[in-house]
Image (spheres, grey):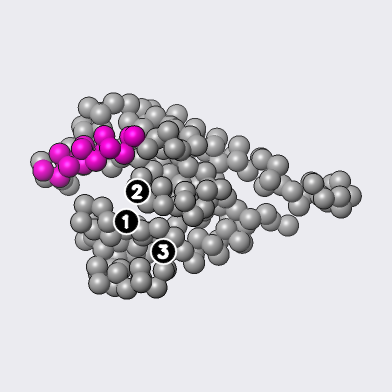
């Protein structure tokens, strides 16, 4: 009796904490599937293939592009990132909500092909705080930090094209806001038409 699931697209500047928020959402909310991206970038730290990303070569990624295997793809900081099209469609049709944690460039491409998705932009409390968080990670060079901050300023201009914005100032409050968006979307009439039809004696809406 499941309706088709909803696609939740979460993005925001690098270092804003969107990955942490998405991980909390997955732990606290049932029946939501994280779409794992394919990337050509090297692994960082303890990242695992098939868990954090599907890691591949630039050549293999480019071959997948030719075969139209991505819902969206982008080249960010000289590395490819993409969302497998088939997996997303299968999970949505099975009634699962699908979560995409992708960059702004990729999100705008998804919005073109799947405008029915729910698009959520994670904001930093300030650009100064965003830079501090990136530095604290200890994985970026000074040049990389400069480039990421420049990119962040550009990405913030896309926020008005999203359905929701969440300021990640207090992690727990931001996490609850993200959960609330998912629950509210699940309560919409369009997500419960089959049940309503049954309760109304088979009358279509």
Q: Which residue is mark 2?
A: 105
100 sits to left or right of 52: right
Vertical order, 98 against 121 (above or below): below
Disc 3 crowd rating (10 Å Cα; few below 14, some 14-19, many 20+) is: many
The residue positioned 41% from the left and 47% from the top of the image is 108
Residue highlighted by disc 1: 74
Which quadrant of the structure image shows residue 184? top right
> Which residue does the numbered mark 3 point to in the structure image?
70
Which SS does the magenta portion mostly show?
helix
Q: Total of numbered circles in the picture?
A: 3
- In 3D space, how far apart are the residues under numbered discs 1 and 2 (Cα atoms)? 7 Å
Q: Residue furthest left?
A: 142
Find the distance from the CA under tag 2 to the CA under tag 3. Answer: 14 Å
Whether tag 2 and tag 3 are in contact, CB under 8 A, the answer is: no
Give neighbour class at mark 2: few <14, some 14-19, many 20+ (Cα, 10 Å). Answer: some
Residue 163 location (% of width, % of height): 50, 37
The boundaries of the magenta stretch are 143-157
* Residue shown at 36% from the left, 32% from the top: 123
Lower sequence index among marks 1 and 2 = 1
- Point 28% across, 26% down: residue: 126
């Amino acid at each position: 009796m499941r309706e088709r699931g909803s696609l939740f697209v979460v993005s925001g500047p690098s270092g804003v904490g969107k990955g942490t928020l998405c991980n909390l959402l997955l732990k606290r909310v049932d029946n939501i599937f994280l779409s794992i991206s394919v990337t050509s970038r090297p692994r960082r730290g303890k990242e695992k293939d098939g868990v954090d990303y599907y890691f591949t070569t630039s050549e293999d990624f480019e071959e997948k592009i030719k075969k139209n295997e991505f819902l969206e793809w982008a080249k960010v900081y000289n590395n490819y990132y993409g969302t497998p099209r088939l997996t997303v469609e299968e999970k949505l049709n099975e009634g699962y909500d699908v979560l995409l944690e992708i960059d702004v460039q990729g999100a705008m491409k998804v919005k073109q092909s799947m405008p029915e998705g729910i698009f959520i932009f994670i904001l930093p409390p300030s650009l100064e705080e965003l830079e501090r968080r990136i530095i604290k990670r200890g994985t970026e060079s000074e040049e990389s930090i400069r480039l990421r901050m420049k990119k962040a300023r550009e990405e913030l201009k896309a926020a008005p094209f999203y359905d929701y914005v969440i300021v990640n100032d207090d992690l727990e409050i931001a996490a609850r806001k993200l959960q609330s968006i998912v629950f509210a979307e699940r309560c919409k009439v369009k997500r419960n038409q089959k049940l309503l039809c049954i309760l109304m004696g088979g009358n279509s809406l």
